[in-house]
Amino acid sequence: MDNPAFLNPDQESQHVSMYDVDWEGPDDPQKPINWPKWKKRGIIIAVGAMRLTTPLASSMMSPALLNIGRDFPGTSDMILSFTVSIYVIGFGIGPLILAPLSEVYGRNVIYHVSNVLFGIFTACCGLSPNIGALLAFRFAAGFFGGAPLTNSGGTVADLVPVQKRGFRSIMSILSACVLMGPVLGPIVGGFLTEAKGWRWIFWILTILSGITSTICFIFLQETYSPVLLEWKARKLRWQTGDPLYMPKGQSPKSLNQLLLTAITRPLRMLGNPIILGTSLYLAVMYGIIYLLFTTFSVVFQSQYGFKEGIGGLVYLGLGVGTAIGIAAFGKSSDAIYTRLTTRHGEAKPEYRLLPLMPSALAIPVGLFIYGWTSQYRLHWILPIIGTSFCGFGIIGCVVHLNILVRLLAANKILQASIQTYLVDGFTSYASSALAANTLVRSLAGGLIPLGGLDLYDRIGLGWGNSLLAFLSIIFASSSVLFYTHGERLRKNSIGDN
């Protein structure tokens, strides 16, 4: 039996004594951060599989939009684009509910339930009898597919020491999974549509979801400390018959109060100027990237006469650019951060933002190349090269801004009291900050693409993409502001959320 040496001395004089159940020191083998590496690797592989599978579904049907339109006559171009982007909106709304629930019931149950429901609703997409049903099922699949986007950050935080969580760490690989999924999806989706029809896209995704769920059932284990300590306290209550064993730091609030606080926290965190600023920046980036996802197939099929299968290959430009970005920033980001920390004698979150500047500039360059070369139907490799610049820039923006949000969340915790750590600790603030970030960017990623084809029809591919490039330049200037004034904004905005 566990040693019940957790009696609070201040309570011994009272009529009722409580036993605070905690970890048995920092090296407790039951603590997730001290688990063996093989067990951690299995959990992280399962999380990575989820973060690849659900983003893959976001864009896999993009090359099939014209085919879907032929099967559902009378569907407008805007509604066809919405079948892709409504999934992304579900991505943003789902974590607002699922992330707080994971902080109450644990991460595992949310992962498993979400995986199963994602698979069910994906299969329903393939059975859709009309465009309305397809939209409804796509939203539901996106809602539950969003669970690993924010919760996986908490899982890694439970397992990996802070000093090992830099750019080249596990979180960077998981971020790459989220970005590579939408790039790889259309390549497979294009050939599937041409060979078997668009419904086979959803049959393949359902099979892949089943494989991912199986991996998760085998390897995933609960890692969230408050839940594990509650299980430990429950075991002690059962073994001793003493109802006074309680997990250390347990909140006196009711379950309803905890849920309300957790669900509303992401929205309240948008009051932080830096979190709001990074969220809006990422929103514009995601809006642009998903506008490209939803229009690539139409642009290359109409401008260059590509069929669905070959049309899916045009997404490789984004993929190559993303891969180059991962390699380039992976080698430079930590080195720059370490050099600046050594030079100035202190570590600041803003030091992570220096590589953001070339990333921000690469996006408008890519949009100009893509827009004008496709406008004049120059060789098809040229617009694809342009999109590679966009992929390079997007990976840099997403990863570095997300790292900043996590560091800001950690900064909040430094101001928090020890008593509230287990209920409102690092994982809670980080998940909430990321949920707020995900909501804003997913709404933009879902709504901005709706006007993409109309934009191109009205002013052409050249000026349409130039307009997007000018918009990205405006927001690129914010990277300089984050770097030069971020510390002052950060210090002025610390407070309870």
Image (tube, grey):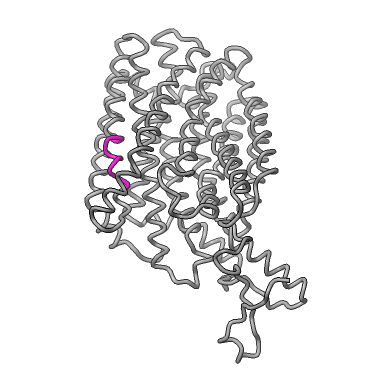
Say which residue appears at 33% left-offset and 9% top-offset.
377
Residue 353 among magenta residues: yes
Q: Nearer the viewer, residue 67 or 318?
A: 318
Q: Is residue 468 above or below residue 439?
A: above
Residue 54 among magenta residues: no
Q: Position of residue 455 (x, y in %)?
A: 34, 24
Say which residue appears at 68% left-offset and 66% top-offset.
232
Magenta region's main secondary structure? Answer: helix
In this picture, which residue range is highlighted in magenta? 352-360
**Left or right of residue 274, residue 100 in this image:** right
**Left or right of residue 471, residue 70 in this image:** right
Figure quadrant of the C terminus: bottom left
**Left or right of residue 313, residue 336 in this image:** left
Q: Is residue 50 above or below residue 6?
A: above
> Quarter of the image holding residue 298?
top left
- Residue 74 visible to the viewer: no
Q: Nearer the viewer, residue 296 or 210?
A: 210
Say which residue appears at 64% left-offset and 21% top-offset.
200
Say which residue appears at 55% left-offset and 51% top-offset.
155
Q: Nearer the viewer, residue 232 or 138?
A: 232
